[in-house]
Image: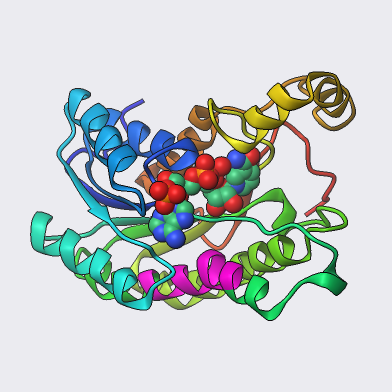
Amino acid sequence: MDLALKGKVVLITGASRGIGAGIAQAFAAEGSKLAICARTEEPLLQAKKQLEESGAEVLAIPADISKPEHASLLVDQTVSHFGRLDVLVNNAGGNRRGNFEETSDDDWEEILNLNLKAHIRVSRGAIPEIKKQNAGAIIFISSIFGREAGGKGLSIYNTTKAGMNSLSKIMAMELAADKIRVNAVAPGSIRFPGGSWDRRCIADPEGMAEFIKREMPLGRFGTVEEVANVVTFLASERASLVTGTCINVDGCQSRSLI
Ligand SMILES: NC(=O)c1ccc[n+]([C@@H]2O[C@H](COP(=O)([O-])OP(=O)(O)OC[C@H]3O[C@@H](n4cnc5c(N)ncnc54)[C@H](OP(=O)(O)O)[C@@H]3O)[C@@H](O)[C@H]2O)c1
């Protein structure tokens, strides 16, 4: 399906591997121009090369979005390179497991900064630029564990993703008049080579087979392409009435009714 994203400039945080890299590939297939970032330069340049091989124009920005000065540099460099910004995908994120009682201020600060505050800063920088285009989209990569209890040991991750969903909704209300649609995508367990689920499957194949039987109604993990398909749809005018929502991409893994 042609999503009419050709020539649109898309900034994706954390796109050197995994879900972010899959999202970048999906936009490249639509003919979009891409600005991608990650902290580690070599895999970032590798991702840029792969995207260029699919014909995309790509700007790779080595940056740590949890540093305020790096976060603001992303939009500046994207706009000075491509001259505009149409879509922002706030994807980079991390986890810190542990019993709540044992979590430290540093644990909270690190993940709050990466999963929430960094996206707030990048979004604030992006909004004036997207407004200039008279239409655009901001998409947050959340988690089903922002909509329901992920379980013990996940207080930090769950809190940051729930906060992200709230933020996304209020931004959608405020930005509707500017024709900027804001949505969140909540993946379930997504497996890709080298990713966290892949490592767990290799370390504990029997335990993971049990996990799939118990938690995954489709009988398998999700793929980065399946998440990316929803993200490109949300970025496109095909989703013109879709704003202020959070869409699960989880094969019915989530038990939430909302
Ligand atoms: N995988 C899943 O099953 C799953 C499920 C639900 C939600 N999610 C969410 O989906 C998003 C992507 O997950 P993933 O599994 O693809 O993660 P991942 O494999 O850990 O990849 C994260 C990407 O973000 C970059 N990154 C990490 N910290 C960064 C920072 N401070 N500044 C800039 N870039 C940074 C990484 O590169 P560097 O390390 O080089 O910086 C990498 O490119 C996350 O928000 C995650 O919470 C994932």
Q: Is residue 246 located in the magenta-colored stretch of the structure?
A: no
- Residue drawn at (76%, 22%) of the image: 218
- Residue drawn at (45%, 68%) of the image: 119
Against 24, is 86 above or below?
below
Q: Is residue 120 left or right of residue 195?
A: left
From the top left corner, tell me how far across and down residue 216 is, in percent. 80, 29
Compare residues 93 and 119 and report the one nearer the observer: 93
Specify the quadrant of the image occupied by residue 101.
Answer: bottom right
Q: Is residue 72 left or right of residue 173?
A: left
Against 64, is 39 above or below?
above
From the top left corner, tell me how far across and down residue 242 is, in percent. 51, 53
Against 11, is 219 above or below?
above
Q: Which residues are magenta?
A: 110-122
From the top left corner, tell me how far across and down residue 221 is, in percent. 68, 26
Q: Evaluate whether residue 132 shows in this view.
A: yes
- Residue drawn at (85%, 19%) of the image: 206
Query: Which quarter of the figure is the N terminus placed in?
Result: top left
Compare residues 79 and 134 and report the one nearer the observer: 79
Q: Evaluate whether residue 239 shows in this view.
A: no
